[in-house]
Image: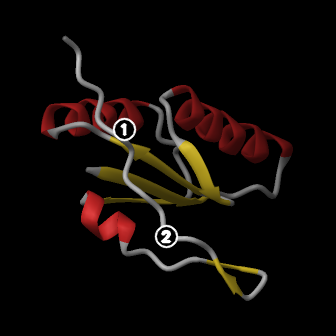
Amino acid sequence: MWMLVMFDLPVSTKEQRKKANQFRHALLDKGFERVQFSVYAKFCTGEAKRKAVLNQIQMVLPRDGKIDILFFTDKQYESVISYHNRLQAPPKNAPKQFQLI
């Protein structure tokens, strides 16, 4: 399952920019990858992991701004169509699962 965090945080003052950067760095520290400006994604291996990561995000939410968190399956992630400079990017693949023996 994928978790997508999208946010629009105020950055008018130095303090607001600092808070926005702290949130962004917290997402990176939790294993999220930047998809676009203010859009970050992370693959979660199951429901327990999804809940744990969601709880971690809730603990670092900034006081101001708008944050949306979406969840979707590997199949839905693979069906995303992306363009870069009007050229269609190759389809994204779900990460490979690791098997410990």
Label 1, label 2: how far apart the Cα atoms are:
31 Å
- Looking at the picture, tell me which residue is in the foreground, 53 or 89: 89
In the picture, residue 89 is in which quadrant? Answer: bottom right
Query: Which residue in the protein does label 1 denote?
Result: 58
What residue do we see at 52% from left, 45% from top? 63
- Looking at the picture, tell me which residue is in the foreground, 101 or 79: 101
Query: Which residue in the protein does label 2 denote?
Result: 91
Compared to 78, does 62 lie above or below?
A: above
Placement of the C terminus among the 4 image quadrants:
top left
What amino acid does circle 1 point to? Answer: Gln
Q: Secondary structure at mark 1?
A: helix
- Looking at the picture, tell me which residue is in the foreground, 92 or 20: 92
What residue do we see at 23% from left, 23% from top? 99
Q: Is residue 87 left or right of residue 93?
A: right
From the top left corner, tell me how far across and down residue 67 is, in percent: 47, 58
Is label 1 in contact with label 2 (beta carbons under 8 Å)? no
Compared to 84, does 44 lie above or below?
A: above
What residue do we see at 30% from left, 27% from top? 98
